Image: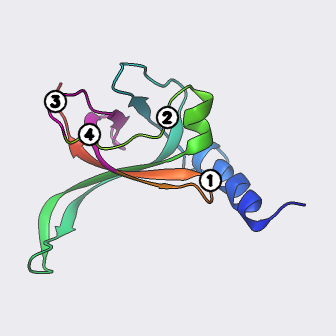
Amino acid sequence: MTGLRDLVQKDLGFIMETDKAGARWPITVTDPSGAASTGLYGLSGDISQVIDPDTGQIISGRLATVSIRISALSALGLGIPQGIEDNTKKPWIVTFNDINGNSFTFKVAQSSPDRGIGFVNCTLEQYTP
């Protein structure tokens, strides 16, 4: 019997990874060992307004995110990206282009996997190798 979670996983695959839905975007994920993805798709965002946690006011800043299906990462031999706070260790790296074709490279600051429906949302920070 197919449950609601199975349906959601199928719908996520359609929305995040097919041309028909129009939402997919090529994303490269590189794990700390240097293994990089090819042919990975998901959703990406890069906005310039954030909320100051101290004041609750909207301020100018940068909030970049990606959402990727866990099964897509697993199929490429990658684990679930995670933030690595130790600056002496290599981070998880995410690269994607904006709508104008400009490439941006980020490190994963935080990841929030939803294993119930099978995707991970990553909050990113600008990164220069």
Please give the residue where the numbered disc 2 appears in the rendered image: 79
- Badge 4 element: loop
Residue type at numbered disc 2: Gly
Residue 84, numbered circle: 4
Closer to the chain start, of discs 3 and 1, is 1
Q: Is residue 93 magenta?
A: yes
How far apart, in angstroms, are the residues tagged by discs 4 and 3?
A: 15 Å
Q: Quadrant of the N terminus?
A: bottom right
How far apart, in angstroms, are the residues tagged by discs 2 and 4?
A: 14 Å
Magenta region: which residues? 86-110
Dot 4: few (<14), some (14–19), or many (≥20) neighbours within 10 Å? some
* Rendered position, 56 above or below 23: below
Looking at the rendered image, the disc whose residue lies closer to the viewer, 4 or 3, is 4
Residue drawn at 18 percent across, 24 percent down: 129
Residue type at numbered disc 3: Thr
How far apart, in angstroms, are the residues tagged by discs 1 and 2?
A: 21 Å
Q: Is residue 18 magenta?
A: no
Closer to the chain start, of discs 2 and 3, is 2
Dot 2: few (<14), some (14–19), or many (≥20) neighbours within 10 Å? few
- Badge 3 element: loop
Task: Please state which of residues 22 and 127 is positioned toward the viewer in this rendering.
Answer: 127
Closer to the chain start, of discs 2 and 4, is 2
- Badge 1 element: helix
Please give the residue where the numbered disc 3 appears in the rendered image: 128
Please give the residue where the numbered disc 1 appears in the rendered image: 15
